[in-house]
Image (cartoon, grey):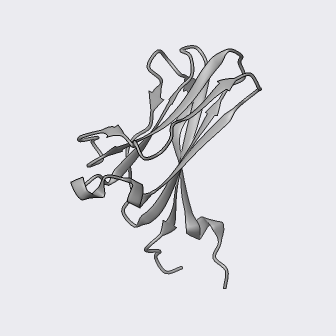
């Protein structure tokens, strides 16, 4: 029997709509335990002449210990001239520095200090699913 999307993907609001600020906005840390893939989705308000950036960072725990940009994923960058652009970046757990105990991911978006941003974080390819 085919699985439901809700059984395959866990979606979290990573960053509620807010002005990006000078350094951008970051989400909390999400554990990748029991998941094989993740995707960050950045949503950006309409504007022109601003560069939008979506980063996926990795850390050793939920407090962000040893945080660093996940270098195996290309940072999605777009010179924004269209209305309401959206950027995505997807990784597999194997892209993380698991040899050094990195187990958590975070989404960061930058987009000009006054421009509004939001982000969601999706985890998929579950290795464990509770019985339904």
In percent of the image, x 56 and y 16: which residue is there?
Answer: 112
Rendered position, 15 above or below 18: below
What percent of the width, then of the height, locates residue 103? Answer: 32, 54
What percent of the width, then of the height, locates residue 122? Answer: 54, 53
Q: Where, quadrant-wise, is the N terminus in this rendering? A: bottom right
In percent of the image, x 57 and y 70: which residue is there?
Answer: 7
In percent of the image, x 47 and y 74: which residue is there?
Answer: 129
Front-lying residue, 88 or 73 = 73
What percent of the width, then of the height, locates residue 43? Answer: 63, 34
Left or right, residue 69 beside residue 120: left
Left or right, residue 129 beside residue 64: right
Which residue is most to the bottom? 1
| Corner quadrant of residue 49 | top right
In percent of the image, x 44 and y 19: which residue is there?
Answer: 23
Which residue is most to the right? 82
| Corner quadrant of residue 118 | top right
What percent of the width, then of the height, locates residue 47? Answer: 71, 18
Q: Where, quadrant-wise, is the C terminus in this rendering? A: bottom right
- Numbered marks: total: 0
């Amino acid at each position: 029997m085919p699985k439901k999307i809700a059984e395959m993907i866990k979606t979290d609001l990573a960053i509620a709509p807010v002005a990006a600020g000078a350094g951008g906005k970051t989400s909390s840390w999400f554990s990748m335990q029991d998941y094989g893939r993740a995707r960050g989705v950045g949503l950006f308000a309409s504007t022109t002449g601003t560069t939008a950036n979506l980063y996926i960072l990795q850390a050793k725990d939920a407090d962000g210990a040893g945080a660093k940009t996940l270098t195996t994923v290309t940072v999605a960058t777009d010179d924004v001239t269209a209305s309401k652009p959206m950027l995505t970046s997807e990784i597999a757990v194997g892209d993380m520095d698991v040899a050094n105990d990195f187990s958590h991911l975070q989404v960061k978006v930058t987009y000009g200090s006054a421009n509004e941003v939001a982000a969601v974080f999706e985890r998929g390819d579950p290795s464990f699913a509770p019985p339904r």
